[in-house]
Image (cartoon, helix red, strand yellow):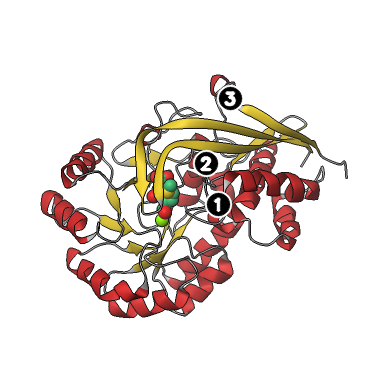
Amino acid sequence: MNLRGVELWRGKIDLVSPFRTSFGTEFSRELLFVHAVGESHAGWGECVAMVEPNYSSEYLDNCVQVVSRFLLPLLHADISAESFVSNASSIRGNYMAKACVETALLDLRLREQSSSLAKFLGATKTRVASGVSVGIQESLDALVRVVGEYLALGYLRVKLKIEPGLDLELVRTIRKEFGDELLLQVDANAAYTVADAEHLKKLDEFNLLLIEQPLPEDDLVGHIELAKIINTPVCLDESITSLETARGALDLKACSIINIKSGRVGGYLEAKKIHDLCLSRGVPVWCGGMLETGIGRAANLALAALPGFTLPGDISASARYFARDITTPFVLVNGHIDVPNTVGIGVEPLPEMLASFRKLTTFEVASS
Ligand code: SMG
Ligand code: MG
């Protein structure tokens, strides 16, 4: 690799509609990108952290700090993504900060080698089934309308955000309206406690694909208890931050399905390891989403094309999020999205979109 420098870019893009979860409402997406600049190529990585530390303890300004103060100084001209990840293990946690640097390095190297991220990761599919994550709406009527619109567009699976007081009724209504065939799952973003187990058991009658992260991220014991009580498969999102936490959760039967997000686990190299573990154990995985722009979405499509991703992921078309994506938009074709197959992650920010972003830092990399 011929890394010369790294730029950090900040931007902001409005969502087409507010996205309400059990922890808050997002109206826009604040963005942080890492641009790894080489001799003749350059790579991009998108940071998935939110503005506030609600989904996880990481947040965007903290990622800027961690990347600039602790991660960029680890780089040198011929560093590989693998050695960066290994060197960065001395920095605890901060998975989202690490992931965006790792991805930019991978993208740069793969472009230099004229290879795609999909090929590098071991993709076996050329398109992936697309699901949609539906935020909490102001009324049941609004929820029915929104879900109906997404289904009319061809989405193959629906995920409903739930929280205490807004759960059974939502699921009952959507099942009644759209039938038992609909692939349906729910995501609580850690809003319940294990004391709610009997209540959550009432979801069993709706034949959901899974319930995602019902309890706090560090409550592994709670998830083990809950999984014994309810029949709906428990899927973990926030709790899984590494190969080790994935293995532990599976060994202890805290979950039977895993949502893989590269940003949450420190990058695509770790994400692939979790995929490989799950594949070897016959544990289904699916690719989560963090309201990424086309940059993050492109890389997620490469990951979701691996053979163990047997459930539709939260990778929707660009139009589900933004009036105008920062890359050429990703579109839904018969419920699927094509996996980029050119070089690196396969996309770059459109110059006119980048023009509205701010360059924060230019970090010169020491020659090795
Ligand atoms: O990118 O389609 C997407 C969003 C999917 O629901 C989604 N993500 O917990 O899985 C999750 C949430 C995290 C982000 S909420 C702002
Ligand atoms: Mg989730």
Distance (Cα) linking label 1 and label 2? 9 Å
Residue 27 horizontal/vertical position (percent):
41, 36
How many marks are shown on the rendered structure? Answer: 3
- Picture layout, residue 299 above or below residue 224: above
Mark found first going from the N terminus, 3 or 2: 2
Report the residue marked by disc 3: 354
Residue type at tag 3: Leu
- Picture layout, residue 11 above or below residue 157: above
Residue 249 horizontal/vertical position (percent):
48, 73
Q: Quadrant of residue 216?
A: bottom left
Q: Which quadrant of the frame does ligand 2 lie within?
A: bottom left
Instruction: Check the picture and name the quadrant holding the C terminus.
Output: top right
Residue at screen point 17% across, 47% down: 140
Q: Secondary structure at mark 1?
A: helix
Q: Would residue 179 appear left or right of 50 to someone viewing this image?
A: left
Report the residue marked by disc 1: 263
Q: Nearer the viewer, residue 159 or 209?
A: 159
Residue type at tag 2: Gly
Q: Would residue 232 appear left or right of 28 to someone viewing this image?
A: left
Q: How many neighbours does mark 1 have within 10 angstroms: few (below 14), some (14-19), or many (20 or more)?
A: many
Residue at screen point 48% across, 70% down: 280
Residue contact between numbered discs 1 and 2, judged by CB atoms under 8 Å: yes
Q: Secondary structure at mark 2?
A: helix
Q: How many neighbours does mark 2 have within 10 angstroms: few (below 14), some (14-19), or many (20 or more)?
A: many
Question: Quick check: is the Cβ at mark 3 less than 8 Å away from ligand 1?
Answer: no
Which numbered tag is attached to residue 296? 2
Q: Nearer the viewer, residue 63 or 108?
A: 63
Question: Quick check: is the Cβ at mark 1 less than 8 Å away from ligand 1?
Answer: no
Residue 346 horizontal/vertical position (percent):
55, 35
Residue type at tag 1: Gly
